[in-house]
Image (tube, helix red, strand yellow):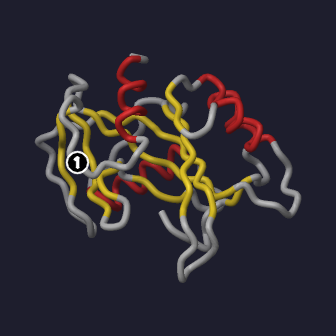
């Protein structure tokens, strides 16, 4: 997740409908569901709170394994990326999952299961900014064929995550699994 021209900036028009589902989310990191909902309900006013992103929490049916991407800049993380203009976050999570792993799945439910906020440093492509991230749950067969887009992808046991994971992965996964 870097600086994408098509990415949705927050606050943005037409996002308030996401706020009730965000407020019901019990697994969060770097923000609270209530804070995230306030940003979604806010009207654009010339100052931006960051970009909207979506991730796919891909678990096996027994909830013992999670599918992760080893992103060259960020480390092990869930497949995901920016929500694009006129795209629903759940659809963005499914699109990013397909692009990064080849798995064509629909979320188990349309409400997010995690909310988080992370910061991105300024680089050659744009200024420092936050990513407000909605996570969606997908169930997949770990024997399904994966098609690597660019970065390595692998299934990992939920109780033995690899070193080099993004900071919010372990606490969010723990909260997600406890919320079943």
Residue 50 image position (x, y, % from top left): 67, 57
Rendered residue at 27%/48% (across/down): 68
Locate residue 149: give its quadrant. Answer: bottom left
- Answer left or right for 22 relative to 135: right
Position of 71 relative to 103 (above/below): below
Tell me which corner region of the image, top left, top right, bottom left or bottom right, holds residue 42. Answer: top right
Residue indicated by mark 1: 163
Judge left or right: residue 125 versus residue 43.
Answer: left
State the quadrant of the C terminus: top left
Q: Could you say which is closer to the camera, residue 32 or residue 16?
A: 32
The answer to whether 174 is drawn above or below residue 124 in the figure is above
- Residue found at x 26% / y 65%: 151
* Number of numbered discs overlaid on the protein picture: 1
Does residue 110 appear in the picture of this structure? no
Mark 1, other Cα within 10 Å: few <14 / some 14–19 / many ≥20: few
Horizontal and vertical percent position of residue 18: 67, 37
- Report the residue at 25% width, 44% height from top: 67
In the displayed structure, would residue 168 be above or below residue 52?
above
Look at 42% across and 49% down and name the residue there: 94
Q: Measured from the top left, where is residue 58 in percent x and y?
A: 31, 39
Q: Position of residue 145 (x, y in %)?
A: 14, 52
Q: Secondary structure at mark 1?
A: loop
Q: Is residue 33 left or right of residue 94?
A: right
- 110 or 1: nearer the viewer: 1
Which residue ends up furthest to the left in the rendered image? Answer: 143
Q: Is residue 82 visible?
A: yes
Which residue in the rendered view is the most extreme toward the bottom?
A: 124
């Amino acid at each position: 997740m870097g600086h994408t021209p098509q990415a949705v900036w927050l606050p943005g028009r037409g996002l308030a409908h996401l706020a009730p589902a965000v407020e019901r989310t019990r697994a969060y990191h770097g923000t609270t569901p209530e804070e995230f909902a306030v940003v979604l309900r806010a009207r654009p006013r010339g100052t931006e709170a960051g970009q909207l992103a979506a991730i796919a929490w891909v678990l096996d049916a027994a909830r013992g394994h999670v599918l992760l991407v080893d992103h060259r800049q960020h480390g092990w993380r869930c497949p995901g990326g920016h929500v694009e203009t006129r795209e629903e976050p759940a659809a963005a999570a499914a699109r990013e999952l397909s692009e990064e792993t080849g798995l064509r799945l629909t979320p188990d439910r349309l409400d997010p299961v995690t909310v988080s906020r992370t910061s991105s440093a300024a680089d050659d492509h744009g200024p420092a900014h936050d990513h407000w991230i909605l996570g969606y749950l997908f169930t997949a067969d770990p024997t399904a064929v994966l098609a690597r887009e660019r970065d390595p992808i692998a299934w990992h046991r939920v109780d033995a995550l690899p070193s080099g994971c993004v900071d919010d992965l372990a606490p969010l996964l723990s909260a997600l699994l406890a919320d079943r």
